[in-house]
Amino acid sequence: MIELMKKYNLPLLARFILGAVFIYASLDKIADPVAFSTNIDNYHITPIAINNLAALIIPWVELIIGLSLITGVFLDGASILTMALLVFFIFIISQAYARGISLQCGCFKTVVDPGLGDLKQEMLWRIFEDFLFLGLAIIVYFRHAFRGTK
Amino acid sequence: MMDRTIKQITFILLLATLLGLARFYFLKDDDFTLIKEARVLQETEVEVSESGEAIFTIPDFMTEPMMASLEFTKYFFDNNRAIFVDARESEEFDISHIAGAINIPFDYYDEYMDTIDALNYDDVFIIYCSGGECSLSLDLADVFFGDKAFENVFVFEGGLPAWQDAGYPTE
């Protein structure tokens, strides 16, 4: 498996996939922090007072780490922040799911698409997706091991 | 190595904060403040009759949805003067809801436009969901009051749990 990863330069592939995902995820939120703040409210996990600040800052963190992952600048810092964000996203969606809160996660789009389908199914899919991305972020952070260099 | 990583993380977070604040500066939305204030709905006034009974009245002119207490909600339920709207998902509605309530899940309210349009705009609507942290009722109330221009829209913040705890009728 490791040999396969080395052969296809999996860390580089992981960087580009994660970078593109994070940049794409940030754009709608940067454009509409008001709607994103409402998305954060719906999780009922953070104090209302900080939700606007979070809605202003988190999308920029996503954009910067997306750019860092693609360009390779500040790669260690960006990959640790990516892992931290993904663990946080997995936690907040899981706790909302466990508490029976159905919500539009605000992961990529801030506004609900009418007729989107079962929100709970979508939450489960997002958790699964975030675990996949977390795996990619771990590969990026430990990229030297996959390249066989220190 | 670790020092360098911590510096990178700090730099990214600081840069994101600066850009976030710059975005706030260019947002030009007076309602969007850096420190968000929780929305508090006004409660209706209660009058007490000579016999000591509480009488709940509706203001002539409302500027936004108002809060309905458990007593207010029960009063309108007993007097059959309000339409109860359950803003939760239909699966939750099917399990239990306030007797006589109709179901308009906020998450899919676009699909219920025919139902909403068939309602009388001057009826009294009491909208509820799961109480506590649930904001579906307030969100749907904003649709009723803001988008559809219904005149008398109330949010029963205690929701179904408060109603059930009081032992009031469900079905």
Image: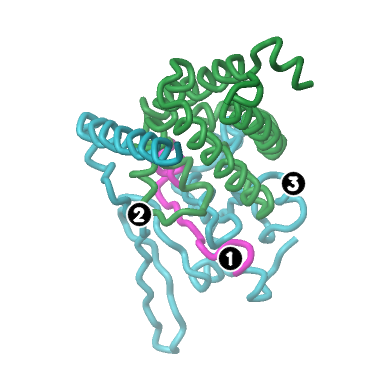
Chain colours: A green, B cyan
Q: Is residue A69 magenta?
A: no
Can see residue A110?
no
Q: Secondary structure at mark 2?
A: helix
Q: Nearer the viewer, residue B153 or A149?
A: A149
Camera-near label (2 vs 1) is 2
The answer to whether A34 appears left or right of A44 in the picture is left
Q: Is the residue under label 2 in contact with that under label 3 (CB below 8 Å)?
A: no
The answer to whether A31 appears left or right of B19 in the picture is right
Determine the image quadrant of residue B25.
top left
The answer to whether dots 3 and 1 both sit on one chain is: yes
Can see residue A75?
yes
Q: Nearer the viewer, residue B136 or B170?
A: B136
User: Which residue in the protein does label 3 denote?
Assistant: B91
Stretch of the chain drawn in magenta = B141-162
Residue A50: give x, y in percent of width and height.
Answer: 36, 51
Label 3 and label 1: CA atoms lie apart by 23 Å
